Structures are given as C-alpha cells and as structure tokens.
Image (cartoon, helix red, strand yellow):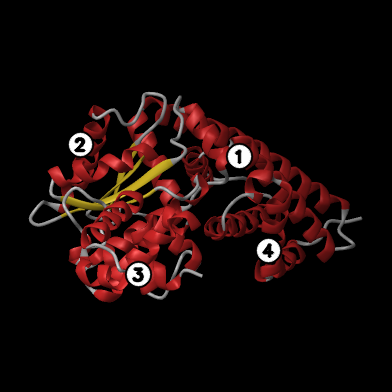
Amino acid sequence: MTSLPAAAREHVRQEMVADPSVVSAIVSAVHEQVPVYAALDDSRLPEVRAIAAWGLERLLDLWVTDGALEPSDLRRLRGIAAARAADGRPVQAVLRAYRVAATVLTDEVAARAPRLAAADAFALSRMLLTALDTLSEEMTTAYAATDEDLAADRDRALRLLLDDLIAGRHASVGALSDRSARLGVQLPDPYCLLVAEPVGAERPDMALDVATGLLEALAVLGVPGDEVASSATVRGSRAVLLLPAAAAARAGAVLGARSWRGCAITGESLDRVAVAHRLAADALDTAPAHAHRPGRVLTDADAHVLALLGGHPAAAPDQVARLVLGPLTDPGQRHLMEALTAYIDAGSANAAARVLHLHAQSLRYRLRRIHALTSRDPRDPWQRLTLDIARTIRP
C-alpha cells in the first residue's frame, strides 16, 4: 500500500484539532487511568486540558510533516516538568499521563483513517516513540533539577507548597505527604491557617517580613514543634501562615503586639486548605470593625457566621450553631442556654435574672460560664451577635 499523501494526513489533523471531543477523550483517559490525576480537584483540570490540546496539535503536526520536537517544545516541556516538581506531582505519573494520551491519539487517528497505509501507521508510531523518548528525558532531567533546587531552599519550597495549597493546586493528601517527605518535613495536622492583615499605617509590602516574624514569635512561645513544617506566604497585603492547630490560641496575642488583625481557621482538613483560606479571607473582608478585639483573632465560627450573613454559607446552619455554641448544645447545659436566651432577649443581666427568677449574681455567673465554655463573651457586641444567630438557627 502506498502512503497517504500529505494532504490526507493534514485533513485528519485538521479534523482532530477542530473536534473538542478528542481533547476531552484524552483528559478523561488520563483522569481515569492515572491515579494521581484522578485525585486532582476541578481547578486543575483546565490546565490539564490546555496541555493536552497543545500536545495533540504539536504531535499531529510532527506526523504530518515528519518533523521532530523543536527547542521551543523542549523548553515548554521542561517548564511543565518544573511546575509538576513544584506542586508535588510524581514524575512517573506525569510520564504515564503522556503515554496514555499517546494511546488515545493513536486510536483517534485510526478511527478517522480506517484504510491508513502501513507507511503512515509506521510514521505515526515512530513519531510518538521518538517524541515520548525525548520528552521523558527532558522532563525527568528538569523535574530532578527543580526538585533539588526546592529541597536546597527549604523556606522557598515551603512557601511554594503553601501557595499551591491555597490555590488548590494539589493532587491528594498522599501527594502532599510525598512532597513534604522530600523536603524532610511534616505538614501540621491538625493545622491552623492564619490570615492576617495590618491595621493602620503599616506598609502592606511588608506582609512577608511580618509573616516571617510571626512564625519566629510563635516558635519562641513553643509553637510549632520541630517535627512539623510551618510556612508563610502572602496574598496582596495579607500574610498567610500554616501552623499547628495549637498556635491558634496564641495568634491573637502575637498579632496584637504588631497591630495586626487576623482570622484563624482550624476546622478544615489538609485537602481543604483552599477552603480554609477563602473562609478566612472573606471573613476579613466582611467583618465589622467591632468584631476585632486586641488579643483575639476571628475563628471558624466567626467566619461561618459572616458567610451566613453574606448569603453564601460554607456550612449548614446546624454546623454553624455547633461551632459557635460548642458545649452549650449539650442537654446538661440547658440552664446556660436559658440564661443566654434570657440575657439576649432582655438586654441586661438584671432583666434576665428577673425573667428566670434568679439573683443577678447567679445570672452573671452563668454568663461567665458561657464565656469560658464558648470563648465568647455575651457582653461583647459582636460575640453576642454570633451567639444570638447561633441560638436562633439552632435546630
């Protein structure tokens, strides 16, 4: 059989490039057959799709022209490999994804040229084998070099890791563990994600310096321990810190000493750091001035109440109520819930005591117990509002 003329190969190429289902088939196959890619969140799939579209067009071009990968292609492949090293996706999984994509490409070509000449089939196979061999060598080398650079600069590597966690650029908790293991560190679990911003005249461009200072100050106080990796990065004028959950209790004092305010999220899992960051950032965007108090940071409960008030709750109302009220939801604390309800409805301790037929001092004692159990002072306007919302929406 004679080879298809170049025009016929070009027709197949144009048909495949113009058909979005081909790229979809490649992405679906990679997603299904490569476990690391199956665990990617939706935010990463557009990037996978873009790389698949570029690879499809370039490989078909090489088939049509009997060409070879060019220096610009190699630079792009090295850049992709460096990015995968930075986000912790194993190079073996990346190379397997390319092999899966090549198999789909072959099947799609065959479906469009059922009477493909042997010479054209051989040309396609030879091109794919050569391209896969070249990209494997280039990407493995670039991946290893980037991995070594990141390991050598531990602070930068941890900052990049936190950047990826915030953006949702991670494959799975397992991939995060592998990445941190290569750095010789352990991610804090449970963790505290602290987002902090300056108050007053402090320069916003000092956010990273201040974040580093916060890490040092917390370490002096005994948090974190040597066995875990804390890290800091910036988002605009805000510092973002990943810390052991135990640091949340001390964060308010450290921020207060630097005239900063913040929000500390401790209730999300490691695969939801991006959710934790969004909660904290939205809370700082929307919290009224009186919600911030010296020595205190906003918490998960504050963030969820603010999300609820903004019409985009991240948690169900009953979960928000549990976050705010804590032990007050236990049946054994019914007397404290009654005291809280009476105080909020009546407007003062004396009036609430009369409603409950208690001595005023007994009512004030119960308010102090509520404060101790929930870390929320019913006498503080913002904290009283959160308690009021929680007891109102509680099932």
| 131, 245: nearer the viewer | 245
Please identify the residue farthest to the right as the structure is shown. 1
| 194, 158: nearer the viewer | 194
Q: Is residue 346 left or right of residue 335?
A: left
Gap between marks 3 and 1 measured at Cα: 67 Å
Gap between marks 4 and 3 measured at Cα: 56 Å
Q: Counting other residues with Cα less than 10 Å from the Cα at mark 1, is it few (<14), some (14-19), or many (20 or more)?
A: many
**Residue contact between numbered discs 2 and 3, judged by CB atoms under 8 Å:** no
Residue picked out by circle 1:
135
Mark toward the viewer: 1 or 4: 4
Q: Counting other residues with Cα less than 10 Å from the Cα at mark 2, is it few (<14), some (14-19), or many (20 or more)?
A: some
Residue picked out by circle 3:
341
Mark toward the viewer: 2 or 3: 3
* Secondary structure at numbered mark 3: helix
* Secondary structure at numbered mark 4: helix
**Residue drawn at x 49%, y 50% as measured from the top left:** 169
* Secondary structure at numbered mark 1: helix
| 328, 356: nearer the viewer | 356
Position of residue 350 measured from the top left corner of the image (x, y, whole percent): 20, 68
Mark toward the viewer: 3 or 1: 3
Position of residue 231 measured from the top left corner of the image (x, y, whole percent): 34, 37
Residue picked out by circle 2:
213
Gap between marks 2 and 3 measured at Cα: 42 Å
Task: Pick whichever of labels 3 and 1 is earlier in the sequence.
Answer: 1
Gap between marks 2 and 4 measured at Cα: 47 Å
Residue type of the residue flagged with mark 2: Gly
Gap between marks 1 and 4 measured at Cα: 22 Å
Position of residue 324 measured from the top left corner of the image (x, y, whole percent): 39, 59
Q: Residue 24 shows which numbered tag? A: 4
